[in-house]
Image (cartoon, rainbow, N blue to C red):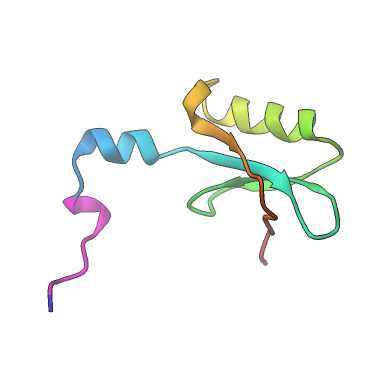
Amino acid sequence: MSPIPSIHDLPATFVAAEANRFVVGQDSKGRWVALEIHGRGGGLFRDRQAAFHYASAETGRCPEAVVVSGGLIELRP
């Protein structure tokens, strides 16, 4: 059995690229959600534009760092 890799085993450029990425979409109740892929940030928003604006600001306006989900996404406590 091979050991489980950690973030320290990844090349620095990969870690930096994955450091602050967001998914924007709707939850099962139709609310707009922005969620950082590692669970370090996110929230509920009144509309898609507000969720996307938040995620874009959090990623330094990097165009590749925010994706819109075609499926449901949920915030978990």
Residue 35 x %, y %: 62, 47
Residue 71 in percent (x, y) is at 67, 52
Residue 12 vertical position relative to residue 9 in the rendered view, above or below: above
Q: Residue at x 57, y 31 (%)?
A: 58
Residue sitting at the far bottom: 1
- Front residue of 62/8: it is 62
Say if the magenta span includes residue 15: no
Q: List the single residue furthest toward the left.
A: 2
| Image location of residue 30, percent across then percent down | 85, 52
| Residue 4 shown in magenta | yes
Horizontal placement of 57 versus 5: left or right?
A: right
- Residue 34 higher or lower than 55, as above or below: below
Residue at image coords 61%, 26%? 56
**Which residue is depicted at the point 17% across and 52% down?**
9
Region in magenta: 2-9
Tell me if 38 is positioned left or right of 35 in this view. Answer: left
Q: Residue at x 56, y 40 (%)?
A: 22
In-image side of 57 versus 29 (left or right): left
Seen as rendered, the residue at the extreme front is: 70
* Magenta residues, dominant SS class: loop
Q: Is residue 34 above or below residue 16?
A: below
